Amino acid sequence: MKQAFTLAEVLITLGIIGIVAALTLPALISSNRNKQLETALKRSYSLLSQALNMYQAANGEPVTSENIGEYELKPILMKYLRYVKDCGKGTDIDKACIPNLDAGGDKYNDVKRTYKTFSGKTDMYLYNIDDGQFVLNDGTLIMLENSPVSGSRILITVDVNGYNNRPNRLGHDVFLFQLGSDGRLIPGGAEGTAYYSKNDTYCSLTSTGNTNGAGCTYKALSDKDYFNNLPK
């Protein structure tokens, strides 16, 4: 007589495998996605830093608010980065760009699908990204703050997996950098940047402020456990 499993035993085993998979797969998927976001952030940081360094090598001076004018940052970066789409300042040019961002009038209320803050409780402050957008060949969306209204502050925000891919949240897949007075690209939240805070005001799990997450970039690049502890 040959030994064999009964149908009931096979079904029970498959059921157990299914339960284990249901319990572990979401965590594995989330971990893999977070690792991809971490890698993409580091890549964006490197590419932008290289572009700024190439400009300085070619022109003998760094890019700072003292030597470039209003809206001049975008063509400088586009010259040294491989881009596939020029979004202007953010009108309805392409689905990869944020629509209606520069449509005139009450433009920010017209944005139907926007970014959320780090905690997910509030819409992101859009004035930091309304002075030019373009899409890189890897899908990264670059967004700029480069206007007289911002004074001497020049900001570069990156959506590392593109506007059409979630989570579309500051400090998750959207990260802010600031140009230093010496032309260095400084992660948002580093000491000396506009969104630095000793008590994590700009990278808070609970804050409802519309710039919450603007100060997370430094943590995302320096804390090895950062992407494992993102808020839901």
Image (cartoon, rainbow, N blue to C red):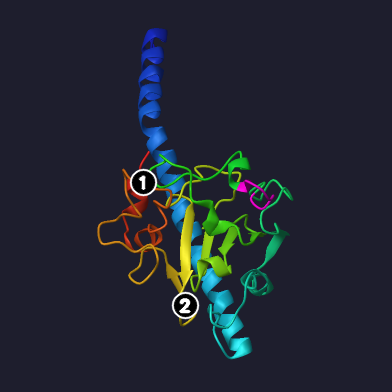
Q: Is residue 164 above or below residue 82?
A: above
Q: In the image, is residue 77 part of the stretch drawn in magenta?
A: no
Q: Is residue 182 above or below residue 9?
A: below
Q: Quadrant of residue 59?
A: bottom right
The residue located at (37%, 22%) in the rendering is 19
Q: In the image, is residue 104 part of the stretch drawn in magenta?
A: yes
Tag shown at residue 230: 1
The answer to whether residue 3 is visible is: no
Comparing 53 with 177, the one in front is 177
Q: Secondary structure at mark 1?
A: loop
The residue located at (39%, 17%) in the rendering is 15
Q: Quadrant of the N terminus?
A: top left
Majority SS type along the magenta span: loop
Q: Give how far across and how far down residue 173 sits, in percent.
A: 48, 51
- Label located before the other in sequence (1 or 2): 2
The answer to whether residue 184 is visible is: yes
Q: Pick out the residue farthest to the right.
A: 93
* Amino acid beneath label 2: Arg
Q: Give how far across and how far down residue 230 sits, in percent.
A: 36, 46
Tag shown at residue 151: none
Q: Which residue is mark 2?
A: 184
Q: Quadrant of the C terminus?
A: top left
Q: Give how far across and how far down residue 156 sits, in percent.
A: 53, 64
- What span is colored magenta in the figure? 101-107
Comparing 40 with 62, the one in front is 62
